[in-house]
Image (spheres, helix red, strand yellow):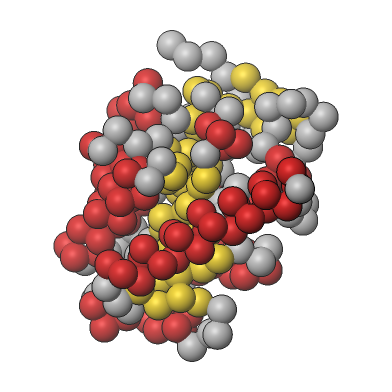
Amino acid sequence: MIDIHYCSKNDAKYPKVLKNIKNAPDTIYYKGNIEIVTEYKNIAVIGSRECSAYGKHLAYETAKYLSGKQINVVNGLALGCDTAALRGALDNEGKCIVWLPCGLDNIQPKSNRNLADEIVDKGGCLLSEYPEGTEIKKYNYVQRDRLQSGISQGVIVIEADRNSGTMHTADFALSQYKRLACYYHKLLEHSTGNKYLEEGKDTKVLKQLSNLEEFVNDIINEEQYEQMTLHF
């Protein structure tokens, strides 16, 4: 059994990208390799629990593509789109980062506990701002959503209705000035949230593979530019 560790804002292992967001947690609890957060780029691949078969397919293939670019896949281990994305990354030897709304001794949903173990075993990590023994409260989900976007350079919404919890993460992404993309709503069934996001000028709409490639390349190039600037 892998132990649960913790780090504070003053520790070297605390993700630098997280320090830049509003209300960053003072302490993070983790299982697995937290250093991948800083070693690689991170993109959240998220969506509703209730999703179409094509939505699951898009989540799987999107995460598979990202892992091929050595980009970590981030989400909350939920059923539906989240699970499909994690599976796509793992099947392509990618690494995953999962934020949980409870203590790491209480993996939720229970049906994904084996998936959580596989994520850690294959070099990924589980994260939480809550200590062991913390049970889930509804408010914790919204609080957790700010961290999914906060630790990522970009967020991709696969499929979500307007009232889905996925929309909280999308809203946080915009307020944190993260890159945001969503799949074109007409491709999917449960997509009133996608349609809503498309109306915003800051969302990149993904209609084909080339759109995803552009979104990812913008993130890669942005990071490279920042490194060049820092070393100039």
Between residues 87 and 154, which one lies in front from this camera angle? 154
Residue that protrudes farthest toward the bottom in the picture:
199
Between residues 75 and 229, which one lies in front from this camera angle? 229
The quadrant in which residue 181 appears is: bottom left
Q: On screen, 16 above or below 220?
A: above
Any part of residue 135 in sight: no
Q: On screen, 70 above or below 65?
A: above
Q: Position of residue 158 (x, y in %)?
A: 35, 65
Which quadrant of the figure contains the N terminus?
top left
Q: Position of residue 111 (x, y in %)?
A: 30, 36
Residue that protrudes farthest toward the front in the picture:
232
The quadrant in which residue 210 appears is: bottom left
Residue beneath the point at 48% across and 39% down: 97
Q: Position of residue 30 (x, y in %)?
A: 58, 27
Between residues 82 and 45, which one lies in front from this camera angle? 45
Residue that protrudes farthest toward the top in the picture:
1
Residue beneath the point at 52% across and 39% down: 40
Left or right: residue 10 versus residue 158 is: right
